[in-house]
Image: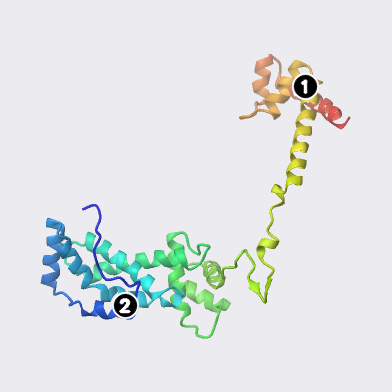
Amino acid sequence: MQGMTLPIPSAAGNIDAFIQAANRFPMLSEAEETALARRFHDQGDVDAARQLVLSHLRLVISIARGYLGYGLPHADLIQEGNIGLMKAVKRFDPDRGVRLVSFAIHWIKAEIHEYILKNWRLVKVATTKAQRKLFFNLRSLKNGYEGQTTLTGPQATEVARRLGVKAEEVVEMETRLTGRDLALEGQQDDGEESFAPIDYLADSRYEPTSVIEANDYARLQDEGLRDALATLDERSRRIVTARWLADGEAATLHDLAAEFGVSAERIRQIEAKALQKMRAALAA
């Protein structure tokens, strides 16, 4: 099967009602679980997959409850966990001697982790696999330092030792964790707009007057360079262009020496004299 869409209860409505409904689905014995898994994988029986999912909804609820400290809706955490559960059911092989409950934990947590990392902050706090692991482990260990918003130096060192990372990595991740999103636009406060980053993050490069001035300056530079090159003889102009104005890789002294049949030192002398003449022309 390319995908699996199951009509399972939704946590998007009344979360308490969903939890009560999920707890009413009976747990499966190992024999029942194996039979259902084989029906799904061997015969494509979606109803068998649905029974496997429904019997493990309470597992999703339990795991999702452990992530409530991130300030995200419990219902959303459960919905993401349900996606992970369905992925686990699709990949579950009963012949490996492992129960679905053990196999599904990884997939449920993976989906919840991905959801948290995408929605906990506007700016992602962890992008690599190592940063993600540190993100969740650090949150868990910090719960042991009750009443503290930040770790002290010795505490950061101890946490780093326990997690097998560098102390500076712990400090950097904690900085990300304790940071907060700041709206670019100001908020209305007593009828007046408060000062916000948008007020001082303007990009002057695209201000009309600055754009015109920059274009004029670039045009004058181009015109001055063309006039300066025009003062050179053909050989000097070729050497300067090849050495300083080439679109690709600049020519070497030896390349030009071979082209004109002279020594590299002679090319260097011609180049130096030509550049001196151009500077005089540009300064006039």
Residue most toward the bottom? 147
Q: For this view, does 161 lie left or right of residue 248?
A: left
Q: Position of residue 108 (x, y in %)?
A: 31, 68
Mark 2 touches mark 1? (CB < 8 Å): no
Mark linked to residue 62: 2
Residue most toward the right? 284
What residue do we see at 12% from left, 56% from top?
42
Q: Position of residue 152 (x, y in %)?
A: 57, 78
Q: Amino acid at mark 1?
A: Ile
What residue do we see at 66% from left, 61% from top?
198
Q: Quadrant of residue 61?
A: bottom left
Q: Quadrant of residue 81?
A: bottom left
Identify the mark nearer the N-term, 2 or 1.
Answer: 2
Q: Amino acid at mark 2?
A: Ser
Q: For this view, does 222 lie left or right of residue 85?
A: right
Q: Nearer the viewer, residue 245 or 24?
A: 24
- Report crowding for label 1: few under 14, some 14 to 19, many 20 or more residues within 10 A (C-alpha): some
Single out the mark in the foreground, 2 or 1: 2
Q: Which residue is mark 1?
A: 270
Q: Is residue 209 above or below residue 26?
A: above
Q: Position of residue 102 (x, y in %)?
A: 24, 70
Q: For this view, does 184 lie left or right of residue 117?
A: right
Q: Nearer the viewer, residue 271 or 238?
A: 238
Asked whether residue 96 appears in the rendered view, the answer is no
- Classify the position of the C terminus by image quarter: top right
Q: Quadrant of residue 34?
A: bottom left
Q: Is residue 35 above or below residue 19?
A: above
At numbered mark 1, what does the secondary structure look like: helix, strand or loop?
helix
Q: Nearer the viewer, residue 156 or 231?
A: 231
Q: Nearer the viewer, residue 56 or 5?
A: 5
Q: Position of residue 169 (x, y in %)?
A: 52, 66
